Image: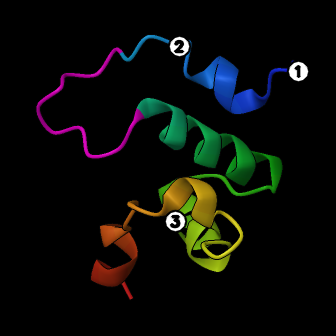
Amino acid sequence: MPKNLIYYLEKIPDFREPRGCRHRLPVVLLITILAIMSGELGYQAMSRFLERHRRNLSFVTRSVHIPYLREHQ
């Protein structure tokens, strides 16, 4: 069976402190990779990317919310 990107991202050990982690590391990495591949650099740009593509990314972002956008609009 072919392996996909999520499979490999789930193999990366989570280096973060458990206290304060809201989202699983593979989800954060996937969104970051997709945003950078789309030319979005920086937190604001990545946040806007996720808002624009939330519907298409719903398979991975169901529980992801973006406080940064709501605070800075």
Q: Is residue 69 magenta?
A: no
- In this rendering, the answer to whether 34 lies above or below 29 is below
* Quadrant where the C terminus is found in the figure: bottom left
The local crowd at label 1, few if under 14, some if 14 to 19, many if 20 or more residues have their Cα within 10 Å, is few
The spot of residue 66 in percent (x, y) is 38, 68
Ranked by sequence position, the earlier of labels 3 and 1 is 1
- In this rendering, the answer to whether 43 lies above or below 70 is above
- Residue picked out by circle 3: 47
The spot of residue 6 in percent (x, y) is 66, 31
- Residue picked out by circle 1: 2
Ranked by sequence position, the earlier of labels 2 and 1 is 1
The local crowd at label 2, few if under 14, some if 14 to 19, many if 20 or more residues have their Cα within 10 Å, is few
* Quadrant where the N terminus is found in the figure: top right
Q: Tag 1: residue type?
A: Pro
Ranked by sequence position, the earlier of labels 3 and 2 is 2
Type of secondary structure dominating the magenta stretch: loop
The secondary element bearing badge 2 is classed as loop
- Going 30% across and 70% down the picture, which residue do you hit? 67
Q: Tag 2: residue type?
A: Ile
The secondary element bearing badge 3 is classed as helix
The local crowd at label 3, few if under 14, some if 14 to 19, many if 20 or more residues have their Cα within 10 Å, is many
In the displayed structure, does residue 5 sit left or right of residue 67?
right
Q: Tag 3: residue type?
A: Ser
What is the number of the mark on residue 12? 2
- Going 53% across and 13% down the picture, which residue do you hit? 12
Write down the region rendered in magenta.
Answer: 15-24
- In this rendering, the answer to whether 5 lies above or below 30 is above
Q: CA distance from mark 3 to mark 2?
A: 23 Å
